[in-house]
Amino acid sequence: MILVTGGAGYIGSHTCIELLNNNFDVLVVDSLDNSSPEALKRVEEITGKSLTFIEGDVRDATLMASLFKDYPINAVIHFAGLKAVGESVAEPLMYYNNNLISTLILCEAMKNASIKNLVFSSSATVYGDPQTLPLTEDMPLSATNPYGRSKLIIEEMLRDLPAADALANGDNNWQVALLRYFNPVGAHPSGKIGEDPSDIPNNLMPFITQTAVGRRKQLAVFGDDYDTIDGTGVRDYIHVVDLAKGHVKAVEKLLSAEGIDGVQAYNLGTGNGVSVLQMVNSFAKENSIEVPYQIVERRPGDVAACYADVTRAQKELNWQAELGLKEMVQDSWNWQSQNPRGYR
C-alpha cells in the first residue's frame, strides 16, 4: 500500500489514478484545506477502483502514527504542503510551519514504523536564480522565495536521514527520491479532474483557463522585460499526467531489488522552455478562444528562465515526458470547460 499525503490535490489526485492503474493499493491523507473530496470520488470513477481516504493534517502526530499502525504501508509519496511563490513571500511563517513541520512529523512516524521508502514532492525552485541552463541535479542549490527555501530545507533534512540510520544501525535503510518538478499544467484527458485552486490562481494555466471560461476578466502577465524570447518568463511546463507517471516510476524504483542509494534527486520536466506569451497564444490557437491579458509588474521571487535536464530520470527511473504543449492546453481547457466552477 502507498500512503499519499495531499492526495486530493492537483498532482496528488492524478498520481492516485496512475497508482491505481498500476495495481497499487492507495491510502490518502489530506486536510482538504486547498483540495476537494470530489477529486477522489472522480479518481475512483475514472479507474473503476477504490482507495482509502482519511481526512486529517499530516502535522497531527497521533494520526500519522495510527496510519502506520493500522495500514500495511510500503512507501510514502509526500505531496502535502503549501505551494504558491507569491503567497510564501507574504506569509513566510505559514509556509515554514506547514511544509517543514508536516515533513518532520511524517518522517518521525515512518522511522518509528520502520517504513523508509519516500518520494518527496520537491520543486525546481531549489535551483534559485539559475546562472546556466538547462538545470542538472548536481548544480548548486539556493532559493529566491520562502516556498523554495522550504523545499530546499526539507531536501537537506531528508539527506541527513541515511547518515543517522547508519550511525544507529550500522546500515542505511532510507530510500528517498526527491522529485524536482518544473511547471505542472494540463489535466486528465477525461476532463473529470484538473487544477482547481480555491482562491485567485497562483499558477499560469488555471489563470488562463478561468479567464477563458469567464470567471476572470483578464490574465495578469507578470513582467515583459525579462531577458527572454519575448520578455515574459520562460518555464519548463510538464503535463500533470506525465508528472504523475514519474511518481509511479519512482515508487517502483524504491520497491525494486535495485532500489535507490540513499537520497537521490530527479528533475521531472520536458527539457524545453516555453514563455508565458507562447503558452497563452498556444492555448488560444488550439482551443479557438481568446484570452485577454494585461502586462503587470514582475512578481517578487520569480526568475527569468528555468528548464530542466532530464537525463537522470530517463536513465535511472526509465521515465520521460510524452505529452506536448498541444495536449497541455487542450486537456486544460477540456477540464475547465466541463467544470466552469471547478469541483464546486
Image (cartoon, rainbow, N blue to C red):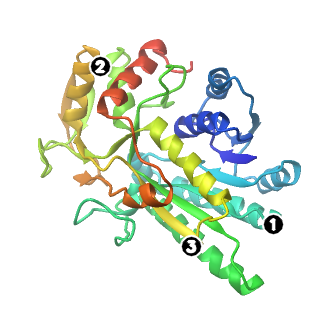
Is residue 120 or residue 340 the one in the foreground? Answer: 120
Q: Amino acid at mark 1?
A: Asn
Q: Which mark is residue 99?
A: none
Considering every residue shown, the one lying at the far front of the view is 257
Find residue 137 and report its horizontal and vertical position in percent. Answer: 39, 66
Q: Which residue is mark 1?
A: 112
Image quadrant where residue 115 sits: bottom right
Residue at x 47% of width, y 51% of height: 91
Vertical position of residue 55 compared to residue 66: above or below: above
First in residue order: circle 1 vs circle 2? 1
Q: Say which amino acid is labelled 2.
A: Lys
Q: Quadrant of residue 276?
A: top left
To which residue does mark 3 refer? 159
- Furthest toward the right, the residue is 70
Can you give x and y, in whole percent of width and height, for residue 218 in the image?
27, 23
Q: How far apart are labels 1 and 2 at the CA level?
A: 51 Å
Q: CA distance from mark 2 to mark 3?
A: 45 Å
Would you name the residue on which mark 2 appears? Answer: 217
Along the line of sight, the residue nearer the viewer: 128 or 247? 247
Location of the C terminus (image quadrant): top right
